Amino acid sequence: MTPALLELIVVILLPVAAFSGWYAGRRGGALQSGRRVSRLSKTYFRGLNYLLNEQPDKAIELFLQLAEADKDTIETQFSLGYLFRRRGEVDRAIRLHQSLISRPGLSEEQKKYAALELGEDYMRAGLLDRAETLFTDLVQMDVSVPQALRHLISIYQAERDWDKAIGHARSFQDATGEPMGALIAQFHCELAEQARLQGEHDTARARIADAYAADPYSTRAGILEGQIELAANNDAAAIRAFERVARQDVDYLPEVIKPLLGAYQRGQDTSRARAFLAEMIEHYPGFAPVQALSRILHDEEGVDVARRFLSRQVRQRPSVRGQAALIELSLDSPDEAIGTLVALKQISEQLLVRSPAYRCGRCGFGARAHHWQCPSCKNWGMIKPQYNLLGE
């Protein structure tokens, strides 16, 4: 069976399974073995048989005929509406689900499920205001409709209405038991970032406290905390925040190392800087802490000590960035190969410029600048600095 065929079977069966499971759950729990929510017709099984025999066109035609001949087969109608939406025929899906909602004789549970499907149609069509109204009505009628809450969270993210997104994420967590702390912390950080950019540091600190309350290990909250303390000329607090970020998630070290080194320098605390960088070298596979420590060694102990240290480190973790740093140190002591060294440095810098500095761990999206929400897959906190031969 081909992947495309398998996907088509899922497209046909998923709405039936979703409705059946949702309806059964609303009726009082899991289905007992051998029990059916509804009785599917022989024609429906013929359609599935076409799919299994890799005859999808015949299957789709038969499902369309089945839906037209027996409009009371609610599962078929849901499958057909889902299929319309997946095929991009959103107008047909909207009309079908609207007719289901207004159809006499349907149970309240069936109408609620049809409303959920209609809301998804509106979202696919970009009619977010209509989808928001419909899902909000569903939640007001029954707050235990997790699908509606999840869709509302997505809508408020798109509209950047972070307070409403927070409220509905909490409701979703209460309704399902699924932890939402990490996502809620991201929303609080969005509000903290807005306050920080407006110079409202007390408000930003309060939002950061809310983010930590939702997710005590929030990396983004730590970075924002450090930035706010730097703006307030509180280098000691900024150092604590940035060091905590690097220790919690070492992948974010490149995001904090520059402001962190600046704070060390202003406080003339190079001994703490050297100790922290040595610690990071043990845990971080990239080149950032090596390069930073080599610069401190250069300033305090001279170019030869720095070059020997850097040479050892580059052999242990070869990278283009390490090569460029070693070349730069070598240029401080001109020799007969200086022309070659200059050329190599230029080539290394060109390779670095062309290489994405960040990549999404979920979908692989590459970027030169950091994003908290991936522009491609829309997941939060998945884009991180990358380290490889051409990366950080």
Image (cartoon, rainbow, N blue to C red):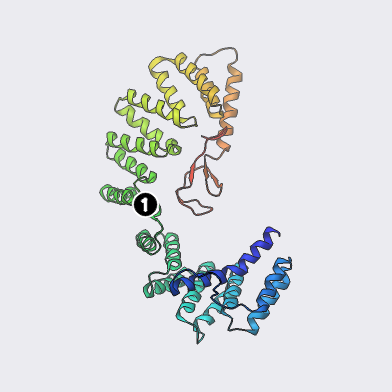
Amino acid marked by disc 1: Ala
Q: As displayed, is residue 59 above or below residue 228? A: below
Residue 45 position by quadrant = bottom right
Q: As displayed, is residue 11 above or below residue 202? A: below
Near mark 1 (Cα within 10 A), the count class, few <14, some 14-19 or many ≥20, is many
Q: Is any atom of residue 285 visible in this view?
A: yes
Depth check, front residue: 215 or 373 = 215
Residue 162, image x and y in percent? 37, 58
Task: Tell me what residue is drawn at x 36 percent, y 63 percent.
Answer: 171
Q: Is any atom of residue 88 visible in this view?
A: no
Residue placed farthest to the left in the image? Answer: 202
Q: Secondary structure beneath disc 1?
A: helix
Which residue carries the number 1 mark?
185
Residue placed farthest to the front in the image? Answer: 33
Task: Tell me what residue is drawn at x 39 percent, y 19 percent.
Answer: 299
Q: As displayed, is residue 341 above or below residue 120? A: above
Residue 355, image x and y in percent? 57, 38
Task: Say which quadrant the N terminus sits in.
Answer: bottom right
Task: Tell me what residue is drawn at x 54 percent, y 82 percent.
Answer: 99
Depth check, front residue: 64 or 224 = 64
Residue placed farthest to the bottom in the image? Answer: 104
